[in-house]
Amino acid sequence: MRFETILAQDIQYNPFEMIGKQWLLVSAGDKERCNTMTASWGGVGVIWNKNVVTVYIRPQRYTHELMEASDYFCVSVLPESMRQVLAYCGKASGRDEDKLAVSHLTPRFEKTISGFEEADLNIYCRKLYAADLTPEGFTDPMLDTRNYPQKDYHTMYIGEIIKVEKKLQD
Ligand SMILES: Cc1cc2nc3c(=O)[nH]c(=O)nc-3n(C[C@H](O)[C@H](O)[C@H](O)COP(=O)(O)O)c2cc1C
């Protein structure tokens, strides 16, 4: 597959569609231990004068363990034809199986982190900030009750966008 490198500000996707509807793969780890999971919560934006991606990962995910150990992570947008891969990566755990092998995803490394040859867009990020959401933080307590019956509060990871690859159409 051929990709072009584009600037973060030239990403053409509507973030609400890209994250909430199309869904993302969030990848963490390194060449020895690489894993990916589906995510539909997150954001793209600006903080500390940097273009950033924010993702929210619950502590029980294998990806969480790898995010904690990694300096980088990657978010990828897959074509609509690969929705079954997103469904699988949002259900199976990398603790139990090699999700990349099962879903025939081909890693594409930038520094220590992988995007995918099959993706339409790979956004490689350098981890800048990690913090757990807390019950005290909610100004609307209903959100806590509804989303965290098991008190498994997401960790928020903010990553600086260091490279964006867009697939070239043949
Ligand atoms: C559509 C969809 C969106 C999801 N979004 C998130 C999310 O934003 N954060 C999260 O922690 N888990 C999310 N999940 C759940 C994880 O993808 C799922 O638990 C996955 O199996 C974790 O894999 P891992 O153990 O290999 O990290 C989502 C699942 C689906 C199907």
Image (cartoon, rainbow, N blue to C red):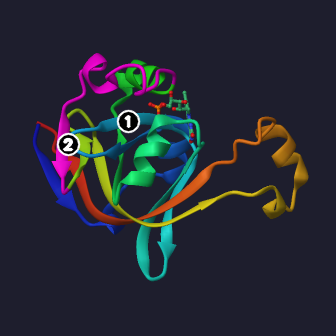
Q: CA distance from mark 2 to mark 1?
A: 13 Å
Secondary structure type for disc 2: loop
Q: Quadrant of the C terminus?
A: top left
Which residue, as the protein is rendered here, is positioned at the far bottom?
A: 49
Q: Is 154 situated above or below 101? A: below
User: Where residue 117 sits: x, y (%)?
Assistant: 19, 36
Residue at figure coordinates x 25%, y 21% from the top left = 101
Can you see residue 13? no
- Residue 36 is labelled as 1
User: Where residue 79 sits: x, y (%)?
Assistant: 33, 31
Q: Is 53 situated above or below 98? A: below
Magenta residue span? 91-111
According to the image, label 2 marks what residue? 31
- Camera-nearest residue between 169 and 2: 2
* Mark 1 beta carbon near ligand 1 (under 8 Å): yes
Q: Quadrant of the N terminus?
A: top left
- Camera-nearest residue between 162 and 93: 93
Q: Residues within 10 Å of mark 2 (few under 14, many from 20)?
A: few
Front disc: 2 or 1: 2
